[in-house]
């Protein structure tokens, strides 16, 4: 038991003496810098992204579109010189169910039924608010002008 007491007091005495006389920081830095040398090399992290042919959520196979592919919706359509057409109103008679539309084509007023054509302008459909006309396979919707 005497040895244990002597060991404890020796440890306490060592801690007190080492606390009173600390090793200077200059010596520590020199020791650390002399033991270790660091090579700081920065290498570029290179990677590449590969396109996936499968949707990770749906599992459907998709193919990337090429820039030179032309979709039907993106085909440039020729601009058609549509004649000046103005929808001016509708005439209804109480005796018949036929509707007669007042349409001005190139500043000339005409009375048209559905399906009739004047100056290559065909009346496709209509109601009291708007009409649909077709000219050279181009369709336009016209709103009632008041």
Image: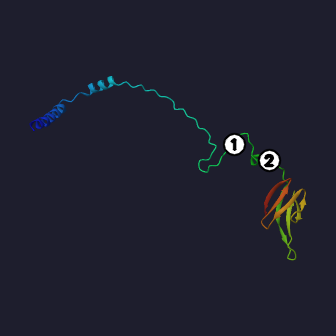
**Residue placed under numbered mark 2 in the picture:** 77
- Which of pointers 1 and 2 lies earlier in the amino acid sequence? 1
**Picture coordinates of residue 62, whole percent (x, y):** 66, 46
**For the view shown, which residue lies furthest in the bottom direction?**
95
Left-right relation of 1 to 126:
left
Residue 81 x, y percent position in the rendering? 84, 50
Q: Is residue 78 left or right of residue 2?
A: right
Foreground label between 1 and 2: 1
Whole-percent x, y for residue 128 in the image: 79, 68
Q: Is residue 56 above or below residue 121?
A: above
Which colour scheme appears in the figure?
Answer: rainbow
- In the rendered view, does 53 fall on the left or right side of 104? left
As rendered, which of 13 and 146 lies closer to the eye? 13
Q: Nearer the viewer, residue 13 or 5?
A: 5
Residue drawn where x is 19% and y is 33% of the image = 19
The residue shown at (59%, 50%) is 57
Which of 57/82 is in front? 57
Callout 1 environment at 10 Å: few (<14), some (14 to 19), or many (20+)? few
Q: Which mark is residue 128?
A: none
Residue extending farthest to the top is 34
């Amino acid at each position: 038991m005497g040895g244990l007491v002597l060991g404890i007091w020796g440890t306490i005495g060592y801690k007190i003496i080492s606390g009173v006389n600390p090793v200077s920081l200059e010596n520590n830095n020199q020791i650390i810098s002399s033991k270790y040398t660091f090579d700081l090399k920065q290498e570029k992290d290179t990677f590449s992204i590969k396109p996936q042919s499968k949707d990770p959520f749906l599992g459907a196979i998709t193919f990337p579109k090429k820039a030179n592919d032309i979709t039907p919706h993106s085909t440039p359509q020729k601009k058609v010189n549509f004649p000046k057409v103005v929808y001016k109103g509708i005439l209804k008679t109480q005796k018949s169910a036929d509707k007669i539309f007042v349409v001005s084509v190139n500043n000339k007023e005409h009375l048209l039924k559905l399906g009739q054509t004047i100056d290559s302008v065909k009346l496709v459909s209509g109601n009291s608010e708007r009409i649909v006309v077709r000219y050279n396979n181009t369709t336009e919707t016209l709103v009632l002008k008041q």
